[in-house]
Amino acid sequence: MLDFLKWGKKTEIPPEPKVPEAKSMFTRFKDGLRRTRAVFSEGLAQVFLGKKEIDSVLLAELETFLLSADIGVSSTEQIMQDLTKRLDRRELSDPAGLALALKQDLNQLLSSAEVPLVLSDKKPFVILMVGINGAGKTTTIGKLAKKLEAEGKKVILAAGDTFRAAAIEQLKVWGERNHTPVIAQHMGADSASVIFDAFQTAKAKGFDVLIADTAGRLHTQESLMEELKKVVRVIRKLDEEAPHEIMLVLDAGIGQNALVQAQKFNEALGVTGITLTKLDGTAKGGMIFNIAKTLKIPIRFIGVGEGIDDLRSFEAATLVDALFSSDAM
C-alpha cells in the first residue's frame, strides 16, 4: 500500500532527525525532500481520504492537486489523459489502483530526464556552469568537484565569475577545502580569458576535468548572455568540441519560473545538463516534472542539503518513491 494512503491527518513538516549517522541513504534523501514531500504526500492523502470509488469528483480533485503541487499544466494534462484512458479500458477499479497508476505516470515523466553525466576521454573534459545569481552555481561546483575527485578524477576549477570578488573567494575556499587547484584573476578581468588560461593549465598538467564558473545573470540580460556565448567561442578555439557539458544550475525554490529561465539559456547556449539546487528548502519541488517533460534536457544532479555530499545524481524512481512516502504515524 502506498504510504500516503495510510494517513490523512494534517501534519506539520517533520523536523530534521537528530541522529543523521543512523540514516540509510534513501532516508537521508527523503529527509532532504521533506518540504516538498510533506506538501505532496499530505495533499494526496487529503484527495484520497474517505474515497471508496473513482468518480468525477475524485478525478477533479486530483487534477487540482497536481496543479497546486507545481507539476505544471502540460504535465498534469498528460497524466490526467492517461489515467482517464486507463479508466476507460477498465484497468483501474479503485482509488488505490488510481494512486499507483499516478505514481507510475510520474515516474515515467521523470525517467526520460534520468541521463547521468558521463565524462568522455577528452582531457580536460570541460564543464561550463551557467545560471542566474543566487542559483547556487559556485556551491554546486565545489560539491561536484568533490564528487568527481572521489571517483578518481583530477579536477581543476576556473573562477570565471569575475563580476563579484566574493564569488572568486568562495571558489577558492571550495578549492582549499577539496585540495582542488583554482585558476583566478582579479575582479573585473575578462571571464573568457580566465577560462582560457585555466584550459591551457589543465591541458599542460594533465587534469581530467575543468569546471568553469561564470557570473550569474538573468535570462533577460541579452548583453550578458552574449558574454557567455563569447566564453563558449573562446573555449572552442582550444577544443572545437568544448565545452563538453553546459550545465545550467536552477534554484528549485522559484517553481515554474525555472522553466522560463531554462528555455532562454538553452536557446542561447544549447544546455546539455541541468542541476536543480535547494530542493531541501522548498515546497515547490513538483516543478521538476514539468522541467523534465518540457525541456527534454537531462537532469544530472539535484541538491538536497548544505553538506558537501548532498549533491546527488538524479534518479527518477528514488525521487518519486520519496514523494509518495510519509513520516506520519
Image (cartoon, rainbow, N blue to C red):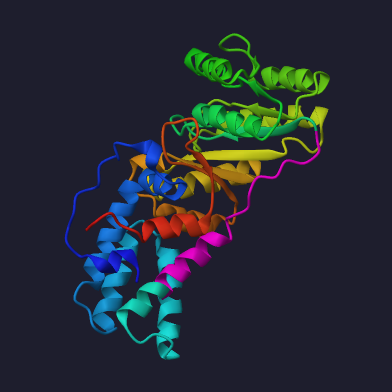
Toward which corner of the image does residue 152 lie, by quadrant? top right
> For the view shown, which residue lies furthest in the top direction?
186
* Span highlighted in magenta in the image: 101-122
Residue 118 drawn above or below residue 197:
below
User: Residue 183, percent across and down?
Assistant: 66, 15
Residue at x 50%, y 28% (from the top left corner): 139
User: Residue 25, percent across and down?
Assistant: 46, 46
Residue nearest the viewer, comparing 304 with 67: 304
Residue at x 81%, y 28% (from the top left corner): 237
Q: Is residue 32 found left or right of 314 in the rendered image?
A: left
Q: Is residue 18 found left or right of 156 in the rendered image?
A: left
Labels in figure, total: 0
Q: Is residue 55 in view?
A: yes
Q: Is residue 223 in view?
A: no
Toward which corner of the image does residue 245 lie, by quadrant? top right
Residue at x 40%, y 60% (from the top left corner): 72
Residue 25 drawn above or below residue 186:
below
Q: Is residue 117 magenta?
A: yes
Q: Is residue 53 found left or right of 185 in the rendered image?
A: left
Residue nearest the viewer, comparing 329 with 167: 329
> For the view shown, which residue lies furthest in the front direction?
22
Q: Is residue 119 magenta?
A: yes
User: Residue 98, percent across and down?
Assistant: 36, 77
Residue 205 drawn above or below residue 118:
above
User: Residue 95, percent across and down?
Assistant: 31, 79
Residue 313 drawn above or below residue 166:
below
